[in-house]
Amino acid sequence: MLFPVSTIKYPAGFDIALQVRVQDRYQTLKEVVVIGKSYRQDSLENRERYRKIFEFEGGGLQTTSAGNLDPNSLINAFRFRRNKVMRSFQNRLVLEEQQKFIDSRFTKGLVRQITGLNERDLERFMTLWRPTYEMVAFNDEYQFHKYILDASRYFKTGVMPRNTSPETR
C-alpha cells in the first residue's frame, strides 16, 4: 500500500513494518536503523569533510610560534594557480551550502501550506520565486512567510520576478 506523507494526520503514530520471508526458519536479520538528518548536521559534516578548503586563506605570509617567517607560507604565496583553484573551490562549497540552506527552509510543504498552489504551479512558483540566501538567512519567520505569500499573489496574477536566473539569486 502507498501512503502519501502529506496525508498522514499523526506521523508519530504511523508505524511502518516490512514483511520479509526468510528461507531458514530461525535465521535472524540484522537490525536496520533509519536516521533523518537536519540541514545543520549535514552542514557540520560538510564543513568537517572540507576543513582544509574552508580554512584556506591563500597566499599570506605567516610567522611561526617562535616569531620566524613560516617557509611554507612563503612558498604558498607564490603558488598562484593552486591558490586560485582553492579559492574557487571554497566559493563553490559556500554557494552549495547556501543553496542547501535555502532548500531546507523553502520547502514544498511550507509553500503549499502558505499559498495553496497545486503541484504544477507549485514547481513553477518555487523555481521562479526562489528567495536569495540573504532573504532566508537574515529575515525572521514572519518576514519570510510574508515574502512567500506576496510572491504567490504576484505569481497568480502573472507578474514575473525581476531576476529569473537562479544562478544570480
Image (cartoon, rainbow, N blue to C red):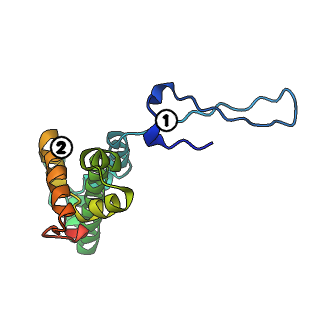
The residue sitting at 46% across, 35% down in the picture is 8
Q: Which residue corresponds to mark 1? A: 35
Looking at the rendering, in which quadrant would you find the C terminus?
bottom left
Name the image quarter holding residue 26: top right
Which residue occupies the extreme bottom position in the image?
Answer: 81
Q: Residues within 10 Å of mark 2 (few under 14, many from 20)?
A: few
Which residue lies under the disc numbered 2? 65
* Residue 24: quadrant of the picture: top right
Identify the secondary structure beneath mark 1. Answer: loop
What is the CA distance from the residue labelled 1 to the residue labelled 2?
Answer: 44 Å
Q: Which residue is nearer to you in this view: 68 or 137? A: 137
Q: Is residue 13 above or below residue 106?
A: above
| Relative vertical location of residue 3 with respect to residue 78 in this rendering, above or below | above
- Local SS, label 2: loop
Q: Residue at x 29, y 70 (%)?
A: 85
Q: Position of residue 144 (x, y in %)?
A: 16, 46
- The reply, left or right, for residue 131 in relation to residue 82 is left
What residue sits 62% from the left and 34% below the top? 32
Specify whether 150 is left or right of 87: left
